[in-house]
Image (cartoon, rainbow, N blue to C red):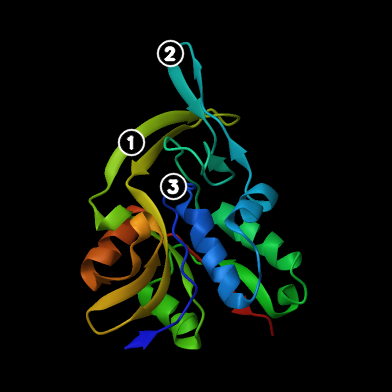
Amino acid sequence: MKLIEAPYLDQSGRYPTGCECVSAVMLLRYLGCDVTVDEFIRRYVPTAAFERRDGELWGPDPREVFCGSPYAEDGMGCYAPVIRRALAAALADAAPLDRRFAAVDETGAPMRALLERYIDRDVPVIFWACIDMRPPVRGPRWRLLGSREAFEWVSNEHCMLLVGYDAQGYYFNDPHGNNGLVRYPRELTEQRHAAQRDMAVSVRLRT
């Protein structure tokens, strides 16, 4: 069994859809960066709203910005590239941490690689899966502002901080519902992670 003791933050109340931001701040605080969730959102996480055009829903690209607001119940969320850029900017403002750590988008990396590259080296991982490991739900759909591309969100999207593992499960600081430190079964976790495009972000030591 491997378990990293990282600070825990709850998203309930103030950040109902801000799991990505809260998970990132847990990692930053573990690294020694004294930033609040509100500061992280305000300084580093761009947001954009949805709009209706002729009865069709148009919205932002979650690979570029947070869709909606992390403070709103109807906010959607954002994907790994947004959090990687936000993490890199926060580290740059927290010198000398930026000289020690580089933010890395590990989307698509196998679970074994995440464990070997990060957890075994005492570095937590920001990890996308589903709320309470519920089944993913396809939709809603919208047309992306700018590119006009048709886009489909996968609902029950959730972000946690991966902090450990044992032979049968993975351990997370789960900000949803004040869950605290939770353990989810390996196979189920990997299924839900795959449903959310295998997204993950962490930091590596600079050489």
Q: Is residue 57 above or below residue 41?
A: above
User: Observer-nearest residue: 166 or 206?
Assistant: 166
Q: Position of residue 204 (x, y in %)?
A: 60, 77
| Sequence order check, earlier mark of 2 and 3 | 3
Identify which residue is drawn at 33% across, 59% down: 194
Please state, as top left, top right, bottom left or bottom right, where the C terminus lies in the image.
bottom right
Local crowd size for mark 3, using a 10 Å CA cut-off: few (<14), some (14–19), many (≥20): few
User: Observer-nearest residue: 150 or 128?
Assistant: 128
Secondary element type, mark 3: loop
**Can you identify the residue that label 2 sits on?**
55
Q: Position of residue 137 (x, y in %)?
A: 27, 42
Classify residue 43 as left or right of residue 41: right
**Can you identify the residue that label 3 sits on?**
13
- In 3D space, how far apart are the residues under numbered discs 2 and 3 (Cα atoms)? 32 Å
User: Observer-nearest residue: 158 or 112?
Assistant: 158
- In 3D space, how far apart are the residues under numbered discs 1 and 2 (Cα atoms)? 17 Å
Local crowd size for mark 1, using a 10 Å CA cut-off: few (<14), some (14–19), many (≥20): few
Q: Which quadrant holds residue 49?
A: top right
Q: Position of residue 160 (x, y in %)?
A: 41, 62
Q: Identify residue type, mark 1.
A: Gly
Local crowd size for mark 2, using a 10 Å CA cut-off: few (<14), some (14–19), many (≥20): few
Classify residue 192 as left or right of residue 94: left
Q: Is residue 28 above or below residue 16?
A: below
Identify which residue is drawn at 62% across, 59% down: 36
Identify which residue is drawn at 66% across, 76% down: 101
| Sequence order check, earlier mark of 1 and 3 | 3
- In 3D space, how far apart are the residues under numbered discs 1 and 3 (Cα atoms)? 24 Å
Identify which residue is drawn at 48% across, 76% down: 6
Q: Identify residue type, mark 3.
A: Gly
Q: Identify residue type, mark 2.
A: Gly
> Disc 1 vs disc 2: Cβ atoms closer than 8 Å?
no
